[in-house]
Each structure stands twice: as structure tokens, then as C-alpha cells.
């Protein structure tokens, strides 16, 4: 799994916790532009989530076990998404505990509030095109319907997905975007949950 702009990283924390609980070898990549967010918020959150799992299981060395799980199954990558994409594509992102490169294609790619400008919509769509597994991968994008004054939102992301699918970078693949849930309280901007699939 790969979470873009993770912040607290709660969705990816759930996936990491489940991976540890089920004893899978799945890797979770937490990505945020700001290194200090990863250091001060994301990593402590992931550690707490995995520690909680080990506490429930009655493990005596909770912190040691959780720390080992984080080293074996998670990566925290700060900085520009396009730089991270390049590193993933060139096997430059490795798990600390095993030194093995992380696969550049993911079953799950999560993004929340990453489509706030037309440029960020294009970047998010490009990352989905480049890093979702064909036909089986699922991208989930949580976004506002509109970001007033900056041009992003659900429609802008769908347009960016169409545009990147028509580009030479798509290699005959295309992104299919559909709204799977809308949240309208009647007194705020509508929020949409978009499903993204990469198909032949």
C-alpha cells in the first residue's frame, strides 16, 4: 500500500496493522512532502497502532516487537512525489530491515486532500498511472468536490486522469475514475470518495 500526503497516516496505519496481524509480507509506504510530519506525527502514530495490536495479543515486549514490524514492513518517504516515483521506478526505495527494494506497483494507493490544484490533480493521476497494479490495484482518492480559487477537486482529478490516460506515458493503459461515495452535509463543500482503477 502507498499513501500520498499521509499526514497522520491513519488509513495506512490500519493497513500496516492488518498486515502485521495477519503475518503478511506487505509493505506500506507513508509519503508526505514534509519530513517533520513523518518524524513527529506519522511514525509515532504507526508505532502506537502496531503497539496496540501487540498489547492486545499479550506480547511482553510491545515496543521492541512493534519497532521490528515497522522496520520490516513500512517506509516513510518525505519530499516531492515525482522524486519518490522516480526512486520507486529505479529500485532506490528499500526496506530498512531487509535492504530489499520495494515493488513500484501497489495493490492499494491512497490519497486524501491531494487534489487541491490542477497541478496536484495531474501529479496524483500520474502516480496512480505509474504505481497502481494493472487490473487489480485500487486507488482511493478522498477530495472536496471543488477547491475554490485554486482549480482542483473531484472533476479536475477526473479530467487529469483522462488526460494522463491519453498521453504517451500511459503505454496503452488508462485510469478509470468513479465516485463511490459523496458526503453532503448541506452546509459545507461536498466531499467525494473516488475509486481509481488502471486498466488495459
Image (cartoon, rainbow, N blue to C red):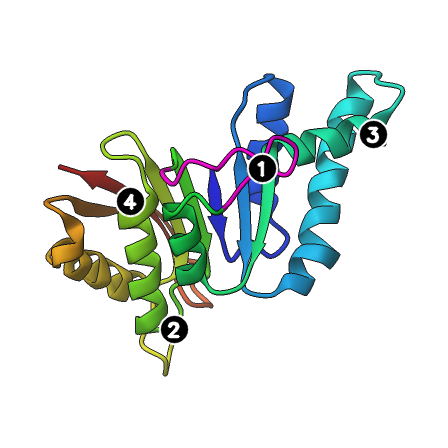
Instruction: List the residue tagged with mark 1.
Output: 95
The image quadrant of residue 163 is bottom left
Residue 59 pos. (x, y %): 84, 18
Mark 2 in CB contact with mark 4 (< 8 angstroms): no
Q: Label 1 to label 3, Cα distance in Å?
A: 17 Å
Secondary structure, mark 1, is: loop
Secondary structure, mark 2, is: loop
The image quadrant of residue 186 is bottom left
Q: Is residue 191 left or right of residue 9?
A: left
Q: Earlier in the sequence, mark 2 or mark 4?
A: 2
Residue 85 pos. (x, y %): 39, 54
Q: Earlier in the sequence, mark 1 or mark 4?
A: 1
> Is 109 rendered above or below residue 78?
above
Viewer can see residue 183: no
Q: Label 2 to label 3, Cα distance in Å?
A: 43 Å
Residue at 39%, 47% (x, y): give it.
Answer: 90
Instruction: List the residue tagged with mark 4.
Output: 196
Nearer to me, 99 or 8: 99
Q: Label 4 to label 3, Cα distance in Å?
A: 37 Å
- Start-end of magenta stretch: 93-105
Instruction: List the residue tagged with mark 3.
Output: 64
Amino acid at each position: 500500500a502507498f499513501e500520498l500526503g499521509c499526514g497522520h497516516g491513519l488509513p495506512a496505519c490500519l493497513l500496516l496493522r492488518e498486515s502485521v496481524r495477519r503475518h503478511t509480507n506487505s509493505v506500506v509506504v507513508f509519503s508526505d512532502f514534509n519530513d517533520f510530519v513523518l518524524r513527529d506525527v506519522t511514525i509515532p502514530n504507526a508505532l502506537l497502532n502496531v503497539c496496540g495490536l501487540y498489547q492486545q495479543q499479550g506480547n511482553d515486549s510491545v515496543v521492541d516487537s512493534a519497532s521490528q514490524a515497522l522496520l520490516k514492513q513500512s517506509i516513510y518517504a518525505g519530499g516531492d512525489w515525482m522524486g519518490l516515483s522516480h526512486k520507486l521506478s529505479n529500485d532506490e526505495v528499500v526496506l530498512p530491515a531487509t535492504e530489499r527494494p520495494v515493488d513500484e506497483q501497489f495493490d492499494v494507493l491512497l490519497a486524501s486532500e491531494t487534489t487541491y490544484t490542477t497541478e496536484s490533480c495531474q501529479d496524483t493521476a500520474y502516480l496512480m498511472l505509474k504505481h497502481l497494479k494493472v487490473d487489480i490495484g485500487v486507488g482511493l482518492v478522498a477530495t472536496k468536490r471543488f477547491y475554490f480559487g485554486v482549480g482542483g477537486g473531484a472533476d479536475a482529478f477526473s479530467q487529469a486522469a483522462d488526460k494522463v490516460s491519453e498521453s504517451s506515458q500511459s503505454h496503452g493503459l488508462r485510469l478509470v475514475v468513479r465516485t463511490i461515495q459523496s458526503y453532503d452535509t448541506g452546509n459545507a463543500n461536498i466531499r467525494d470518495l473516488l475509486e481509481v482503477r488502471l486498466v488495459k
